[in-house]
């Protein structure tokens, strides 16, 4: 049974109040829970509590802080599996040994100060700074970045304290043990996945990089290429007509890239057919938008998708193949697509899709977008994609007819 987690705003408010929260990551990554608080709020009592986690007490900081106080990576070649960026451990210069909760609190709070300097600290010490990626969990889905993000979102300096939580046996605490701990101490508990989704919703990450008129066999469109903060992807909007004029809500298609279906007309899926059907339907109405999102293979990438094809040739369906490769059935995220719709001036949308996950994306908190209709877009099936479509209907809830 899935664990009931708190919301990200609840966790941010707890951090703002000086409380400790528990943050968990994906069960297929570290499968770990960490105590986290803002570095500015790291009192001796808070540090003493966090040390109950039995893990390594660390502080995540951004590169400019590390550079200012001359902190260097503790190894020149980081070959750790998750590339955790440990820097020179430090103590505050006034400490006797640096090991007490009070001394570590002083070290951490000074490290979070915007005017800290090299001479404020001695090295080596008992507090381990970690170098967080600029952009936080949108760049790296780790506890290092989550701690920094939560502190920043709570209005503090972008520096967070974290300590892994171990069980009584010394192993990583299980989800059940973490829930029990959160309940016992009235702590908020969230996941890194939630934090990523929240930031993609609540922060404006997209901007127009280029745009031009684009004549097609379906009529004249406007093409807009977007850049996304902290990410290399370049999503595209293909727009026809005035999307802000009153009247019937425009048709919108959120289309994830499919090299095999979109570009070379593969018969193994329905992607290419849906792409062209959507453009034709938008053109027939004279207004609408197709958002082209670089999420190949439901978010697993082209190489992994082709591996999944090979497993399907051996008898697996598309969901089983993804699971066999260590992925969820669908890894896509529509937060960036929704931000693009807002940039285009849309409010009411008729969504061209058979996929309930896309419809559910419009319920994400923070967007002033209203889904007024879900318009089916059902292409013809063939002997090569019949099983694929049946799996989407039976296992993923797509609104498709029974093809048997």
Image (tube, rainbow, N blue to C red):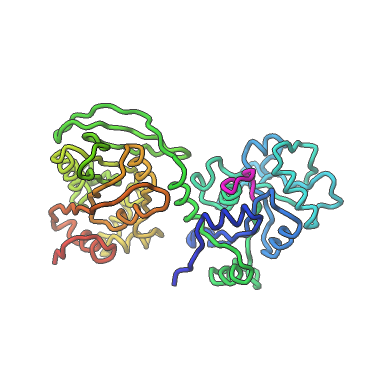
Q: Residue at x 51, y 55 (%)?
A: 8
Mark yes or no: residue 49 visible. Answer: yes
Foreground pick, 244 / 333: 244
Mark yes or no: residue 83 visible. Answer: no
Say how many tags the image has. 0
Left or right of 190? Residue 399 is left
Q: Residue furthest right?
A: 96
- In this picture, is 310 found above or below 132? below
Q: Residue furthest top?
A: 212
Quadrant where the C terminus lies?
bottom left
Q: Pinpoint residue 46: horizontal percent, then vertical percent.
A: 71, 59
Q: Is residue 153 magenta?
A: yes
Foreground pick, 163 / 328: 163
Q: Which residues are magenta?
A: 152-160
Q: Pinpoint residue 27: horizontal percent, then vertical percent.
A: 49, 62
Q: Residue at x 32, y 38 (%)?
A: 345
Q: Pinpoint residue 28: horizontal percent, then vertical percent.
A: 48, 60
Left or right of 364? Residue 156 is right
Q: Is residue 68 magenta?
A: no
Q: Residue furthest front?
A: 246
The image quarter containing residue 87 is: top right
Left or right of 365? Residue 172 is right
Left or right of 23? Residue 277 is left
Dominant secondary-structure state across the stretch colored magenta: loop
The image quarter containing residue 287 is: top left
Q: Pinpoint residue 148: horizontal percent, then vertical percent.
A: 60, 47
Quadrant where the N terminus lies?
bottom left
- In this picture, is 101 found above or below 155? below
Q: Residue at x 39, y 58 (%)?
A: 327
The image quarter containing residue 35 is: bottom right
């Amino acid at each position: 049974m899935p664990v009931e987690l708190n919301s990200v705003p609840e966790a941010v408010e707890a951090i703002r109040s000086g409380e400790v929260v528990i943050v968990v990551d994906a069960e297929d990554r570290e499968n770990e829970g960490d105590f986290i608080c803002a570095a500015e709020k790291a009192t001796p009592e808070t540090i003493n509590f966090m040390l109950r986690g039995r893990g390594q007490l660390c502080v995540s900081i951004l590169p400019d802080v590390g550079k200012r106080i001359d902190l260097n990576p503790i190894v020149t070649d980081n070959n750790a599996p998750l590339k955790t960026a440990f820097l020179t451990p430090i103590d505050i210069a006034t400490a006797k040994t640096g090991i007490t909760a009070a001394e570590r609190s002083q070290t951490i709070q000074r490290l979070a100060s915007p005017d800290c300097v090299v001479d404020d600290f001695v090295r080596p010490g008992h507090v381990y700074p970690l170098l967080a990626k600029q952009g936080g969990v949108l760049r790296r889905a780790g506890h290092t970045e989550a701690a920094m993000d939560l502190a920043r979102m709570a209005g503090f300096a972008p520096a967070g304290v974290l300590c892994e939580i171990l069980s009584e046996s010394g192993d990583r605490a299980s989800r059940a043990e973490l829930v029990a701990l959160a309940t016992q101490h009235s702590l908020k508990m969230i996941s890194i996945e939630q934090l990523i989704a929240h930031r993609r919703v609540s922060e404006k990450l997209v901007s127009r990089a280029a745009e031009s008129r684009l004549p097609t066999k379906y009529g004249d469109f406007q093409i807009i290429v977007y850049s996304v903060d902290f990410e290399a992807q370049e999503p595209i909007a293909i727009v026809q007509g005035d999307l802000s004029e009153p009247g019937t809500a425009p048709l919108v298609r959120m289309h994830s890239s499919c090299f095999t279906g979109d570009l070379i007309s593969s018969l193994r899926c329905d992607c290419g057919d849906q792409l062209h059907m959507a453009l034709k339907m938008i053109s027939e109405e004279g207004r609408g938008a197709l958002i082209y999102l670089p999420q190949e293979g439901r978010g697993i990438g082209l190489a992994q998708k082709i591996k999944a094809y090979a497993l399907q040739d051996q008898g697996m369906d598309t969901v089983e193949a993804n699971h066999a490769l260590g992925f969820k059935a669908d890894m896509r995220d529509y937060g960036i697509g929704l931000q693009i719709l807002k940039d285009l001036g849309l409010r009411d949308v008729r969504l061209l899709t058979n996929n309930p996950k896309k419809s559910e994306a419009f319920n994400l908190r923070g967007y002033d977008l209203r889904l007024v209709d879900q318009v089916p877009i059902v292409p013809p099936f063939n002997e090569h994609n019949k099983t694929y479509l049946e799996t989407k209907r039976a296992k993923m809830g797509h609104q498709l007819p029974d093809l048997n």
